Image: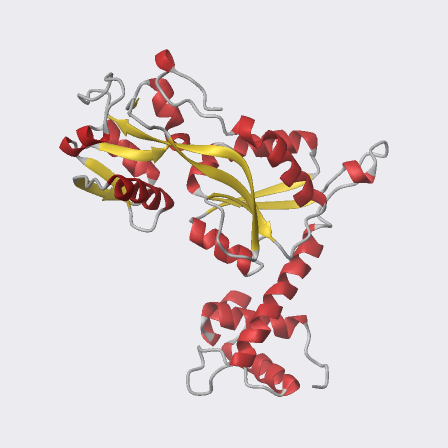
Amino acid sequence: MDGLWNLRHVRVFEAVARLGSFTKAAEDLQMTQPAVSRVVRQLEEDLQVMLFDPHRRKQLTEAGAVLLQHARLIHAQVQAASDAFVWRDKPAHVPATQWPRGLLHLAVVSPAHYFVPRMLKAFHAQFPEVLLKLTVARRSEILEMLLNHRLDIAITGYPPSDAELEAVHFARHPHVMVAPVAHPLVGRQQVVWDALQHSDVIFRERGSATRIFFEQILQAKNMPLRKSLEMSTNEAVKQAVMHGMGISFLSAHVCQTEIKSGLMAVLDMVDMPKYIDWCFIHRRDSVLSGVHLAFKQFVVNEGARYSECVLAPMSQSFVAN
């Protein structure tokens, strides 16, 4: 290797590997396809290895897979260095140790985006020099971004099983059974689960964290339910419930407005609500500092307060501890 390869070579290679196409990488990087091919070929010559299978150019070789891991780490470090310089001058009277600054890019699962903006607003009030970016995605997508160094911090439910990721619990995440306000079970106390078998049940789509959690509960109770609808978003489920199409199992966070307004009812059921954890997640090999460390400390100390939920109509309300 003669050392001629540089960050541009790595960036082009990562784009081809990520998109699975020289043509798509060229479009993404605003280059011509021949130029992308030349860069990859030059990188292979400098490293004296084949990075892509010569017969199936979309498939990485073993050497290509190794380089991709390093390329993503290099990209993450370059991006972190760039983000660290996105600030204005700090006030002269404020010590540098008390003034985190730069870009805070946080990814959250869908239920969290109903309360996380309040947290970000409060954090930004303390540290106005921080620039905020919020990404809402599926849990599997967020974990993949963390593992691929495309993201530094996230908030999700369920501590991840991957050893490369560290999770810190900061609050409980309540789930409830919701129903149209005219449903016959509304107003009854301590409804047993068997009573649900006579109701149409609206499920989230397969693979969603809410669906997985609900099916685990049903399996533990050995109780099948009549599935009337399957929907891909919480908003669609809420609309269906409010229009009398059935009952559903939802994160309490996603239906706070409807519960408080009396547009939707929470069933008073035995052994409910069900809880999982809200977790602050980051890579174990990433030492958090600056704005990321400040935000982690803020979430651990204040997160439970900002994620409190009303779990019943206001006339019968209580707040989860």
The residue that appears at 69% across and 30% down in the rendered structure is 126
The residue that appears at 69% across and 52% down in the rendered structure is 287
Residue 185 in which image quadrant: top left
Q: Residue furthest left?
A: 198
Nearer to us in this view, 160 or 112: 160
The residue that appears at 44% across and 25% down in the rendered structure is 309
Q: Quadrant of the N terminus?
A: bottom right
Question: How is the rendered protein coloured?
Answer: secondary structure
Nearer to us in this view, 5 or 169: 169
Give the image location of residue 177, x and y in percent: 29, 30
Kindly tell me whether residue 26 is visible in this rendering.
no
**Residue 62 against residue 298 in the figure, above or below:** below
Using residue 101 as the reference point, say whether residue 96 is left or right of it.
right
Nearer to us in this view, 125 or 265: 265
**Residue 50 against residue 122 in the figure, above or below:** below
Give the image location of residue 153, x and y in percent: 58, 48
Using residue 74 as the reference point, say whether residue 256 is left or right of it.
left
Give the image location of residue 112, x and y in percent: 47, 37
